[in-house]
Image (tube, grey):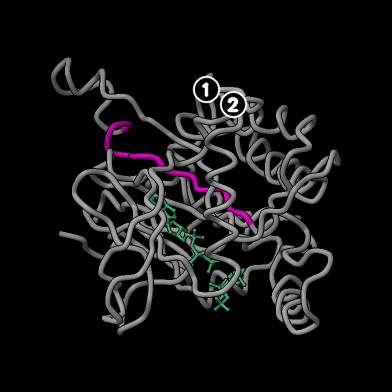
Amino acid sequence: MLKVPEHQVAGHIAKDGKLGPLVDDQGRFFKPLQGDARGENEAKFYESFSTNKNVPDHIHKYFPVYHGTQLVEASNGSGKLPHLVLEDVVSCYSNPSVMDVKIGSRTWYPDVSEEYFKKCIKKDRATTTVTLGFRVSGFKVFDHQESRFWRAEKKVVLSYKVNGARLALRKFVSSNSPSDDDDSPPNCAFASEVYGGSDGILAQLLELKAWFETQTFYHFNSCSILMVYENESILMKGGGDDEKKKKPVRAQVKLVDFAHVLDGNGVIDHNFLGGLCSFIKFIKDILQS
Ligand SMILES: Nc1ncnc2c1ncn2[C@@H]1O[C@H](COP(=O)(O)OP(=O)(O)OP(=O)(O)O)[C@@H](O)[C@H]1O
Ligand SMILES: O=P(O)(O)O[C@@H]1[C@H](O)[C@H](O)[C@@H](OP(=O)(O)O)[C@H](OP(=O)(O)O)[C@H]1O
């Protein structure tokens, strides 16, 4: 039985009769192929990437596993539609905190229509895409004090300027109750466990950066970094039984949304690489502060 994903933080959402992704209980994420070139392009990317032997295994792990396409009953009631069948990257968590960050200082790319260019540049200028080389697209944090999720409001997220983006990255790893109009500064209680450490978010981003410094196969236009972790496992550390103490934090970085990936044609993806470097600097600053 397919259902609407509980932990989706951005993009097209399957509600109010709209077309959006679905998940099953086997850890698979079904993303409908958008009826235009975007769906076809994303499927083409996954076919190419999943069989590309030039991409090292330690890089493949930053992408959802691809299980082909399948006709399934669409969320908008329009009958069976082709869907990408992907690994549901949050299915192994019980209460995941999730953030989607769109990377790049532009989301448009050469040869798009005038209409698409205008739509993109408007949003790129209104958000931190142009100024920072990335923008937060959405996030949710598991609030332990209240034992429930807190979700950032989409219109607030899309209005972030530099300080808003910095604050969001701090809230994402804080244990004091988050809110959009909270005066108390985020305490960054989970920063060192989630962003830091030998297998934390920063280490993973640096591994990705090293690949982006040389890879010229693909240009990842308008693609997002998804960060996921479980704060429950951090809070349980140091107390409780041994099993709980051993539960790993499992902070993960995954790349998602490949509807606008182009062939790299032997050229470095400097739009993604530049955005990634800028994003890394923000994460480093939080760790150092
Ligand atoms: N493989 C996955 N596993 C779990 N969640 C995912 C996966 N892929 C995407 N998501 C969730 O869905 C959201 C939207 O994903 P994606 O960007 O691929 O969709 P989209 O509708 O093409 O978005 P946009 O409108 O920004 O182009 C992500 O922010 C994330 O929360
Ligand atoms: O950031 P938001 O507010 O969620 O807005 C969406 C986001 O900009 C997507 O990147 C875009 O899809 P493309 O990048 O594929 O164009 C989508 O366009 P759409 O609504 O025309 O699908 C927007 O709705």
Nearer to us: label 1 or label 2: 2
Report the amino acid beneath label 2: Ala
Q: Residue at x 55, y 62 (%)?
A: 40
The image quadrant of residue 42 is bottom right
Query: Is the N terminus in the top left, top right, bottom left or bottom right quadrant?
Result: bottom left
Q: Which residues are magenta?
A: 223-234
Snapshot quadrant of residue 112: bottom right
Work out whether residue 74 or residue 23 is closer to the camera in this orientation and state it: 74
Label 2 secondary element: helix
- Is disc 1's CB within 8 Å of ligand 1? no
| Circle 2 residue | 203
The C terminus - image quarter:
top right
Measuring from the top left, give residue 113's x and y in whole percent.
77, 78
Q: Which kind of residue does numbered mark 1 sit on?
A: Gly
Element type at mark 1 = loop
Query: Eyeballing the image, is 278 above or below 128?
Result: above
Q: Nearer the viewer, residue 265 or 158?
A: 265
Tell whether position 227 is magenta.
Answer: yes
Q: How many marks?
A: 2
Q: Is residue 278 left or right of residue 140?
A: right
Residue 172: in magenta span: no
Residue 203 screen position, x and y as percent:
59, 26
Q: Which mark is residue 197?
A: 1
Residue at 32% across / 62% down in the picture?
71
Above or below: residue 17 compared with residue 147: below
Say if mark 1 contacts mark 2, CB within 8 Å. Answer: yes
